[in-house]
Image: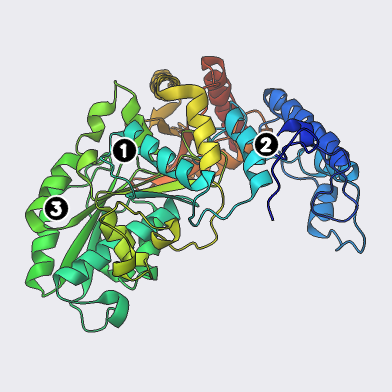
Amino acid sequence: MSQTPDAQTPDARTPDARTPDRQFPGEGLPGEDFRAAARAVADLAADYLGAVADRPVWQPTDDAGRDRLLNAPLPAGGRPLAELLTAIEDEVLPYPMGNGHPRFFGWVNSAPAPAGVLATLAAAAMNPSSAGGDHADVHLERAVVRWIAELVGFPHRPGAGILTSGTSMATVLCLAAARGRAAREDGWDVRADGLAGMPPLVAYCTGETHSCVRKAAELLGIGSRRLRTVPTDADGHLDVAALRGAVAADRAAGLRPFLVAASAGTVNAGAVDPIDAIADVCADEGLWLHVDGAYGAFGVLDPLIAHRYAGMERADSLALDPHKWLGVPVDCGCALVRDAAELRGTFSLVPPYLRDEESGGLGWFSEYGMEQTRPFRSLKVWATIAHRGRDGIAADIARCTALARRLGELVERDPLLELAAPVETSIVAFRHRAPGLPPKAVDALNHDLPTAVQRRGRAFVTGTVLGGHEALRACLLNPATTEADLAILLSEVHAAAADLAR
């Protein structure tokens, strides 16, 4: 029975109704203990983030610390919150991956946006399942998915997007929708009957395409042998003429081409495929165009490189990661599709007559993907974007690309270094020339250099292989990075190379 609030009964929705000894989940956890612990966590996080630049970027976990983490016994009894916070401070925070540091240039892992960090705590306090229903997280996800589409210039209709754990899962969703469309066009119900009996589906990508595309093809029954590797030009861009030839050859062999995966920022060098020309091929051949924009799609916000992304708005699907260049705390990916019905039709188990399409009903998010119980991802996306705004995000991205170009210039001016690929977005691939060493020894030195730099602790860079040769790869995602940090990176590369040569 409901009770109407009056002067004697404070409304439970107002601050006046707070009860100091209200119990929170967990035996013996009074509200004021939680409040004190939460404030301590805020101080701990603020102190950690404030001192990131003063610590080594990364160092191996010492033996004692590793042993404590690996062999921690299952506790028989509970521990006070204050004691847990001390353990976090002493046993976890001293051993970071390093991605919050302005001289972390490894992989594609960003520093966390402060607004996103705060929102993560609030979202965890609510702890809903964002599968669907009429609560704030569901409506907020619709909004932030639209914001993401607007940021990258992708056409968006309500329901034509969903937040995921990352681009790997977003790619599975998008390729599944593409598979479903191809099957339907051939008069086949792949959801009911599977792939057996269909003409073999064929998809196309390059050797620079992220491995998540191959994983998706394997999981969806297409198979890695039916994922054709299209040649690239010298700088890693998909060769459009070779794509046309491959599609024609497969059709002549009785196969069923259905999808092309283009890259809006490759993993190794940040190269952007000629998406507009690829879209022409897809339009001519009736193929689904999927764009992997996991890291690089947000580069379209930099006016100096936006031209590279021409045609991205023509894609049938776009997968990207707010937890990369936007700095949203992990995990958070996003799948955007041109036609919401393709995504919903691939995953929904709700009968069509109950979907209420005419009244604009969008159904639950669980009808658009694999997850049923879904975390409250949208609040940290909302906070991150709202805190910086479109202009702030665009400025951050433009700063990262400018720093990358500057690093490329420094490499080109250095007689001991050379670029391994042009700088197109915010990834710089380069090599140490190691003069006087034979080619195999040069490759060996460049293979060992990233780890040697990492262990020195002043900068973090990773390695890759381009054109069959080992190279270093620096990815710039942190707008707090400075030109002085770039100079330290190159200084560390030289010092580590000298140590290896000795």
> Residue 34, labelled with which disc?
none
- Where, by quadrant of the figure, is residue 258 drawn? bottom left
Q: Does residue 96 appear to the left or right of 229 in the view shown?
A: right
Q: Determine which residue is flagged by label 2.
A: 58
In space, the residues marked 1 and 3 are separated at their CA atoms by 20 Å
In space, the residues marked 1 and 2 are separated at their CA atoms by 28 Å
In space, the residues marked 2 and 3 are separated at their CA atoms by 44 Å
Residue 342 image point, x, y percent: 27, 59
Crowding near the residue tagged with mark 1, few <14, some 14–19, many ≥20 C-alpha atoms within 10 Å: many
Q: For the residue marked with disc 3, what is the amino acid?
A: Cys
Contact flag, marks 2 and 3 (Cβ < 8 Å): no
Instruction: Please name whichever residue, 136 or 15, is drawn nearer the observer in this view of the structure.
Output: 15
Residue 480 vs 218, above or below: the answer is: above
Residue 438 image point, x, y percent: 44, 42
- Give the mark, 2 or 3, whose residue is nearer the N terminus: 2
Label 1 secondary element:
loop
- Give the mark, 1 or 3, whose residue is nearer the N terminus: 1
Crowding near the residue tagged with mark 2, few <14, some 14–19, many ≥20 C-alpha atoms within 10 Å: many
Q: Determine which residue is flagged by label 3.
A: 282
The answer to whether any part of residue 97 appears in the image is: no
- Give the mark, 1 or 2, whose residue is nearer the N terminus: 2
Residue 213 vs 293, above or below: the answer is: below
Q: For the residue marked with disc 2, what is the amino acid?
A: Trp
Which quarter of the figure is the C terminus placed in? Answer: top right
Q: Residue at x 83, y 37 (%)?
A: 37
Label 3 secondary element:
helix
Q: Determine which residue is flagged by label 1.
A: 271
Q: Does residue 251 appear to the left or right of 71 in the view shown?
A: left
Which quarter of the figure is the N terminus placed in? Answer: bottom right
Residue 335 image point, x, y percent: 37, 50
